Image (tube, grey):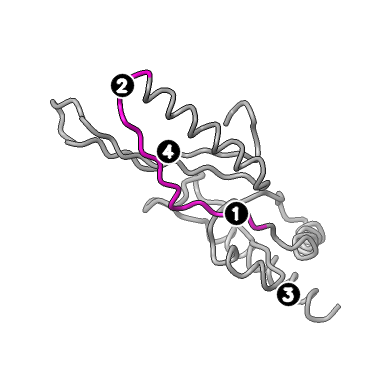
Amino acid sequence: ARAIGDPLVLTFGKVEPKPNTVNVVPGEVLFTIDCRHTDSNVLIDFTQKLEQRINEIAKEMDIEATIDLWMDETPVPMDANIVSILEEAAKKAHMKYRVMHSGAGHDSQIIAPHYPTAMIFVPSIGGISHNPAEATKLEDLVEGVKMMASALYELAYK
């Protein structure tokens, strides 16, 4: 994943050794790999190579590997016009911003194939996200609301 680089991301989010005790070598490990990229062809190619490598290592070590692509989803692009409107709203208001790829499976992933869609993210304190410790400064939330209001006005009246 590092060799390919941005926007490919790879996350090992869950690891469950069995048994999960301090002094026993596990006989089984369940783990998740979340792999995301904006281009479905790159994602498919990378996933196939990753699966092949996992199976090669398992064979070399005389262990069994079972792969289940239960969360396999095709990337869904956001609407370029709305993204452009959001970017212009940020520029006009002299807001600090960056256009970024999410890869996240938000509701927008379901809505985007049917309606023009984009997302606004605001920074989490310390970059901590999807965690009970996640928090956002009030001023960042306010900036996000201002950006959304500006974009909605642009979409509704221009």
User: Does the residue at mark 2 contact the one at mark 3 (Cβ under 8 Å)?
Assistant: no
> Which residue reaches farthest right?
158
The residue carrying mark 1 is 74
The answer to whether residue 156 is above or below residue 34 is below
Residue closer to the observer: 52 or 115 = 52
The answer to whether residue 112 is above or below residue 101 is below
Query: Which x, y percent locates residue 97?
Result: 70, 51
Helix, strand or loop under label 1: loop
The residue carrying mark 4 is 12
Q: Which mark is residue 31?
A: none
Q: CA distance from mark 2 to mark 4?
A: 23 Å
The quarter of the image holding the N terminus is top right
Query: Which x, y percent locates residue 52?
Result: 49, 30
* Residue at 60% across, 57% down: 121
The quarter of the image holding the C terminus is bottom right
Q: Residues within 10 Å of mark 2 (few under 14, many from 20)?
A: few
The amino acid marked with disc number 1 is Thr
Which of the two marks, 3 or 4, is nearer to us in this view? 4
The residue carrying mark 2 is 62
Q: CA distance from mark 2 to mark 3?
A: 58 Å
Helix, strand or loop under label 3: helix
The amino acid marked with disc number 3 is Leu
Helix, strand or loop under label 2: loop
Query: Which x, y percent locates residue 25?
Result: 18, 25
Which of the two marks, 2 or 3, is nearer to us in this view? 2
Residue closer to the observer: 116 or 18 = 18
Q: Disc 3 or 4, which lies upstream in sequence?
A: 4
